[in-house]
Image: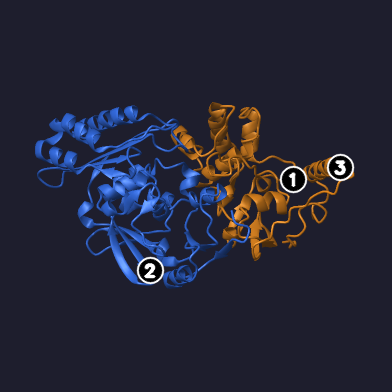
Chain colours: A blue, B orange
Amino acid sequence: MRSDLDYLVPSSVEEAVALRAASAGAAYLLGGTDLLPQMRAGRKAPGQLIDLKRIPPLREIRETADGGLSIGAAVVMADVEVHPAVLGRFPLLAECIRTVGAWPLRQRATLGGNVCNASPAADAAVALLALDAAFHVVSAEGRRSIPAGSFFRGPGQTALLPGELLTDLVLPGGAAGFRGRYLRLSRRKGMDLATVGVLVGKSSGTAPDRWRIGLAAVAPTPLRVAAAEERLEAKGAAAAEEAAALAVAACRPISDLRGSAEYRRDMVGVLVRRGVVELG
Amino acid sequence: MTEKDGKEGCGDGCPHGVSRRGFMTRVGAGTIGLGVAAAAGTAEATVHEIPPGEPHRVTLTVNGTTHRLLVEPRETLLYVLRERLGMTATKPGCERGECGACTVLIDGAARYACLTLAVEAEGHEVTTLEGLTKGEEPGAVQRAFMDEDALQCGYCTPGQIVAAEGLLRARPDPTLEEIRTGMSGNLCRCGAYVHIFRAVKKASVLRKDAGR
């Protein structure tokens, strides 16, 4: 960590964006559960930390006009996973968040920070992809919305431009009602990254049923497998085997200390099949 | 409420007089000092000066006591608790938010002190293991850990006890599953988990009996 590090606490989004625009070497700070270890390891060396946690609108969960939900970037995961609207309408998000780190970590780690860190193993990101979330960002140039599907570009790489600030993550009302399972393999239940994560979601509110298949830790970014979803929507749960094969074809795993690429690929097939059969 | 200048640790200016822990800290420091002097011998000792960042004046509330300190933005709460305030119950482990040895309560919830900058803790209530005892009298969770033999080497134990306290404040009567979830952020390399879970259950009973 730089010895001349400075710490700034803006009280509004506009102030934060102005501070960031004024200093090229600054970084936004949310929970810091990724950023601070990266700084200690020397992998990142910002000159200033702009702490966003004291900006009130970033700490809110709000209902949106279309029946969706806007989750402020600075809301900690522990608050998202127990929020009644999340549990009632978007339980897939809570299902994924509950597997991140451990309870004390989730008291600190934010949903916004999790997506900006863009880990290929980001459990919460899989749910946001599956639920067609939109990420609202702001910079000195103005505001824009980035669909979750085009936000993740690679390990640690996102579609954010330098200086852009993620204000909130918006779940559309149309994505309400999906239920399902996040099947996650790791060496230890708490405090370990996923070796493989598979989200299987289903919504029975319409005919035919809608399906969602998301994958973590088996590609450079969290993935959604549209081909598998379409197959399930056309043929129902009877197509579990085909959906599993399509997910296996879509993943691009690497071998690392958590597992080999071959193991990961096999497990994607097993877990997709298992999830689809379970949801029937 | 006492106010202390951050320049002095809990050493000589400690308002509590010489505690057992304070005594040991000072003896330890003295030993290290002698070691350096002996090793330096006749040669001039090299001192590496690290230029500090602009220090921030912060007010930290730890165990109900207000401390006014000058801290550098890069200093973690863990560092400031141990090295500036001399409160060594909070243990450094992985220092990257993976082991839980440094667990403290912030506004009553278990959090990792290694992942919190001291400047961020301003305006929040910090509680450390020292705040869970009355002098040398152990608190309910500590009593339960002793009764249930919930440790071997003991290094993770302060963090385990504080995490258990945080869990019991949120859920005074947790199920085994809730205990396992609540304690999942604290690693024990000796593998005393079964005893730890038992101790947390026992602590919930002791706390109830104590009327808390």
Instruction: Give the image location of residue A236, x and y in percent.
Output: 12, 36
Q: Residue at x 69, y 62 (%)?
A: B69
Q: Is residue B49 above or below residue B29?
A: below
Q: Which residue is mark 1?
A: B135
- Please name whichever residue, B103 or B203, is drawn nearer the observer in this view of the structure: B103
Instruction: Pick whichever of labels 1 and 3 is earlier in the sequence.
Output: 3
Q: Residue at x 78, y 44 (%)?
A: B25
Numbered circle sitting on residue A139? 2
**Residue type for callout 2:** Ser
In this image, A240 relative to B199: left or right? left
Residue A105 lies left or right of residue B14; in this view the side is: left
Crowding around mark 3 (Cα neighbors within 10 Å: few <14, some 14 to 19, many 20+) is few
Q: Which residue is mark 3?
A: B34
Q: Who is closer to the viewer here, A247 or A88? A: A247
Q: Amino acid at mark 1?
A: Gly
Task: Name the element at disc 3.
Answer: helix
Is the same chain shared between marks 1 and 3? Answer: yes
x%, y% of residue A175? 22, 52
Circles 1, 3 touching at the beta carbon (< 8 Å) = no
Q: Chain of mark 3?
A: B
Of circles 1 and 2, the one toward us is 2
| Mark 1 nearby-residue class (10 Å; few <14, some 14–19, many ≥20) | few
